[in-house]
């Protein structure tokens, strides 16, 4: 993991990263480049001439390296159009793009325009996330791989301020646990099963302090799931040689009264073949990412504990492999969910909502909840509606949704509110059971949300976050986002807990 430092002194690293923006002009011939070097003075006239010769534009995701004078390299990272104040997300992405481009270098100082602590945190997060790489299973091919940045220093005149030091510590935790989410997503199903997922999280919780920092892990195994009536998780996992699990992480603040109590529930399908509604082979390898929600809620809960946020969290990860076998759930099977509701399984590939239904009911056994949030790579319809970079928010409580949506503006994670039209609910009716697991094809993301809504008490504020597209990047890397697992939702889940304290 890349280490993080804060400084306002002389540059000691081998690389200096500064920003580059552009000013638009109404005059023929375009605008001009602007160097944004934060609190560090540079010979900007000479550098601008060099950048112009190199064809620099200052656009987002552009990274230009030139030989430095006091440092080995001077790196310019694009900020886009010049602003009096750049948004935190602009700076987060620019720092990430530079960190990605600096693989093979040992250390770098980032001096970007940061006039407040929150901006320092954004730059630090971007640099840490941009430096991420996943090489766990490389052996011979590591010879051709350049190592990620080992050390990142954020340069700021605010470095000696207590608030700046605090946000740097927070950014380091956010970076580390977002990278944990990415690692879990990128781990292949041969190495990440429901059982090994539980063991890895349990070992991590023990390593960071366990009960001493308020964390407790409970695992319900396959036999217990069946005997206790968790029909959704059991039905999805029964076709696999790797049996299902329900992982619970409870966080109770130590030496502080909890300001709020939330339940986080994450879909944990460690691999999804579609079951007896078998998916096409093309692209099925990405289905190792179908546990992104579970990874996000588990890592967020541990991060909240390490940040000592006085908010109680009950985290649930219903974990299963959706496989094809003689034991797999068949189309038209009827199952009984935890809590007693019966479901006609018309499509075994609509499995995420089944495991989530069980976990949502279980989570509500805590009668002191202020809200419940589920996170899931739930529907392909989400990608059709919102693309691969924007996640969906659905809710039974507009005030709670508005609160969360406002929080995502500061975290830089793209979400968008979506409706739950009442007229689509009838499409989930079954002639033989309480409900079917699929309904109207048009608006499939919304229908899935309506299905989950049936498992949440009307009076309990609830958010359903469908992260199907943004959770796993199958395109080119950009900003601080790599190819593969992205770690989306963790920053916003942590920020939701932090907002409860303000």
Image (cartoon, rainbow, N blue to C red):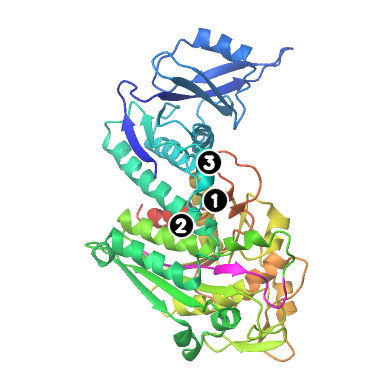
Tag 3 or tag 2, which sits nearer the N-term? 3
* Element marked by disc 1: loop
Q: Secondary structure at mark 3?
A: loop
Give me the disc on residue 59: none
Instruction: Identify the residue position indicated by label 2 in the image.
Output: 493
456 relative to 213 in the view: left or right? right
- The residue that disc 3 covers is 480
Q: Are marks 3 and 1 in contact (CB under 8 Å)?
A: no
Q: Decide: is 168 above or below 394.
A: above
Quadrant in which residue 83 is drawn: top right
- Compared with 454, 152 (above or below) is above
Span colored in magenta: 259-278
Q: Which mark is residue 486?
A: 1
Residue sitting nearer the eye, 486 or 313: 486
Residue, x 66% and y 51% (percent of image)? 388
In the figure, is residue 180 to the left or right of 331?
left
Is 434 placed left or right of 158 in the picture?
Answer: right
> What residue is shown at x 62% (from left), y 15% (from top)?
54
């Amino acid at each position: 993991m890349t280490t993080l430092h804060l400084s306002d002194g002389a540059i000691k690293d081998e690389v200096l990263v500064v920003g580059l923006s552009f000013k638009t002009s109404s005059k023929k011939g375009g605008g001009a480049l602007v160097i944004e070097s934060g609190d560090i003075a540079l010979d900007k006239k000479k550098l601008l001439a060099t950048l112009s010769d190199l064809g620099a534009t200052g656009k987002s995701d552009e990274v230009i390296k030139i030989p430095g004078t006091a440092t080995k390299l001077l790196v310019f990272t694009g900020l886009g159009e010049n602003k009096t104040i750049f948004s935190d997300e602009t700076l987060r992405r620019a720092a990430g793009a530079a960190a990605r481009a600096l693989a093979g270098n040992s250390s770098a100082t980032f001096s970007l325009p940061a006039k407040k602590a929150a901006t320092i945190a954004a730059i630090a997060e971007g640099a840490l996330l941009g430096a991420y790489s996943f090489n766990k299973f490389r052996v011979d091919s590591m010879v051709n791989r350049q190592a990620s940045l080992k050390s990142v220093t954020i340069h700021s005149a605010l470095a000696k301020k207590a608030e700046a030091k605090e946000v740097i510590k927070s950014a380091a935790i956010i970076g580390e646990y977002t990278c944990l989410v990415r690692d879990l997503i990128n781990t292949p199903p041969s190495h990440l099963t429901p059982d090994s997922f539980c063991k890895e999280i349990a070992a991590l919780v023990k390593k960071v302090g366990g009960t001493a920092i308020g964390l407790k892990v409970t695992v319900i195994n396959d036999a217990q799931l069946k005997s206790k009536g968790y029909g959704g998780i059991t039905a999805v996992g029964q076709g696999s040689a790797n049996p299902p699990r329900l992982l619970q992480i409870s966080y109770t603040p130590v030496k502080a009264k909890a300001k709020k109590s939330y339940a986080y529930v994450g879909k944990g399908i460690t691999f999804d073949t579609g079951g007896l509604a078998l998916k096409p082979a093309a692209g099925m390898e990405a289905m190792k990412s179908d546990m992104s929600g579970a990874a996000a809620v588990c890592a967020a809960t541990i991060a909240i504990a390490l940040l000592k946020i006085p908010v109680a969290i009950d985290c649930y990860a219903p974990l299963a492999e959706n496989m094809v076998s003689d034991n797999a759930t068949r189309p038209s099977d009827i199952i009984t969910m935890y809590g007693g509701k019966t479901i006609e399984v018309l499509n075994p590939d609509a499995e995420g909502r089944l495991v989530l239904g069980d976990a949502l009911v279980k989570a509500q056994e805590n009668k002191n909840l202020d809200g419940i949030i589920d996170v899931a790579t739930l529907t392909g319809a989400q990608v059709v509606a919102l693309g691969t970079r924007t996640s969906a928010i659905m809710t039974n409580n507009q005030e709670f949704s508005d609160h969360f949506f406002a929080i995502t503006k500061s975290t830089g994670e793209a979400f968008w509110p979506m409706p739950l039209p009442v007229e689509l609910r009838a499409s989930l009716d079954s002639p033989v059971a309480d409900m079917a697991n699929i309904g109207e094809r048009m608006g499939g993301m919304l229908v899935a949300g309506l299905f989950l809504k049936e498992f949440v008490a009307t009076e309990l504020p609830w958010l359903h976050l469908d992260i199907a597209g943004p959770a796993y990047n199958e395109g080119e890397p950009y900003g601080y986002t790599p190819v593969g697992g992205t770690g989306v939702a963790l920053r916003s889940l942590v920020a939701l807990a932090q907002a409860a304290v303000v």
